[in-house]
Image (cartoon, rainbow, N blue to C red):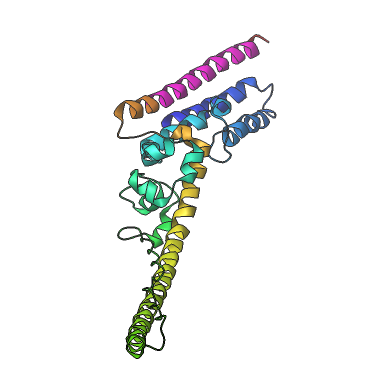
Amino acid sequence: MVLVTFAGMMLGLFASAVAPNANSAPLIVIILMLPQIVLGGAIVPVPPAVSAPTSTRWALEAMMSVTGAGSDVISDVCWALPPEIRDSMTMEQKLENNCKCMGVNLLNPDSCNHPGIGAFRVGELDGPLPVEPVRPPDPVLPERPVQPEDQSDSIAMADYFAKLQAWEAEATAIQAASQQAFAQYERDLEIYIEARKNIETSVAPAEGVVRTFYNAIYWGYVNKEDTVAYYGKVITAWFVQVLICLLLFVAILVFQKRKDVI
């Protein structure tokens, strides 16, 4: 913050040195400040190469690094995957691959800390993911008794009718049990679908928020647990800020010298 404030002061002095008179200096300041606001990366996503000359971009990058915004996302191996693979992963796969900032883990503040997703933690999941119920098998009826060829045989026919009555009772019991199992399956399926819907209602928009930030200002993310990468990014941002201040200071001296000569 000190460096970006100093850079802003140097930018104002640079406008004074460039301005031919006092009346034009405020207009030059506005012209110089607009790129700092628009190209800083906080309002409109711009490519890193475009925002590199602005001091506000490096201030934003250093602030994101110091505060740890996006630290959990950049350290998540799942966000390093190609977009088409990330989008095709199910919530179960995200859990199996230990995705810190995807799926239901995204709603856990101990797993993922990222700006903008706190509003979606109302539906945070407690416990494992709901398991889809297994569809019961179709009923298999026993083989129907075969009617004897000689229907005049009273003993054989009596035995046939006894077996047929037992078969009908067994078939009726099997069908009733199957109907009961399918009714329970439909109830469990409705509960499962509703539970998945509630989870996706929280997870999907939260992932959308992270995706928007990740695609726009990924260059500001750094893993704070990786001390080499963390201090490297912070020191680089400070160094560039100092370099911008030095370049402005040299330009001020050059333009002021030319103005004194003229």
Span highlighted in magenta in the image = 235-260
- Residue 113 visible in rendering: no
Indicate whether 238 appears above or below 34: above
Our reading of the magenta stretch's main secondary structure is: helix
The residue lying toward the viewer, choosing from 241 and 146, is 146
Q: Residue 75, percent across and down?
A: 36, 36
- The total of numbered circles placed on residues is 0
Q: Residue 51, percent across and down?
A: 56, 29
**Which residue appears at 42% of the width and 21% of the height?**
239
The residue lying toward the viewer, choosing from 58 and 216, is 216
| The C terminus - image quarter | top right
The residue lying toward the viewer, choosing from 20 and 107, is 107
Compared across the picture, whether 186 is left or right of 127 comes to right
**Which residue appears at 46% of the width and 42% of the height?**
86
Compared across the picture, whether 145 is left or right of 58 comes to left
| The N terminus - image quarter | top left
Indicate whether 30 appears above or below 18: below
Q: Is residue 251 magenta?
A: yes
Q: Is residue 224 magenta?
A: no
Asked where in the image residue 129 lies, by quadrant, the reply is bottom left
**Which residue appears at 38% of the width and 47% of the height?**
93
